[in-house]
Image (spheres, grey):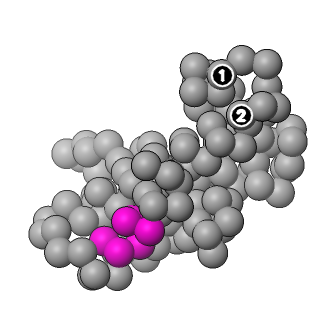
Amino acid sequence: MSSEHLIEQAQKILDGSSSLPGVKIRLSLWYARAALEEYTVARLDGIVSCDPADMTMASRLIFLKELNPDVGQPASYAWWALSRACHYHAFELTPTQEEAEHLVGIVARVCGTR
């Protein structure tokens, strides 16, 4: 799936266009994280000497920050926050709708869909 399609799915889940009970916030965050990962692969394709899909996400984010700090910095923040929010821990609260919308919004801006 393209990053545009993934971010569209995340936004649909958050705005209620998609009816998935119970897990909608974490699922939307997962879609947003996948969109960001796809975006970094597409953005670095042809720029780095290896296949960006074979690189770790941390490495891709470092390259992205070097290419364009105005995109790389929010992308890095969003990816780390999304990674933490996507994983369920019984001792942590589920991210709120507002927190999810904020993170999805950052990814949409980074990917150029908003």
Picture mark count: 2
Residue denoted by label 2: 45
Secondary structure predominantly adopted by residues drawn in magenta? helix
Q: Is residue 35 above or below residue 54?
A: below
Residue denoted by label 1: 51
Q: Quadrant of residue 109?
A: bottom right
* Amino acid type, callout 2: Asp
CB under 8 Å between callouts 2 and 1?
yes
Density class for disc 2 (Cα within 10 Å; few <14, some 14-19, many ≥20) is: some
User: Residue at image x 65%, y 42%?
Assistant: 42
Q: Label 2 vs label 1: CA separation?
A: 7 Å
Q: Quadrant of residue 5?
A: bottom left
User: Residue at image x 66%, y 51%?
Assistant: 75
Q: Is residue 77 above or below residue 17?
A: above
User: Residue at image x 58%, y 60%?
Assistant: 107
Q: Which residues are magenta?
A: 8-13
Rendered location of residue 9, percent (x, y): 37, 65
Q: Is residue 101 above or below residue 17?
A: above
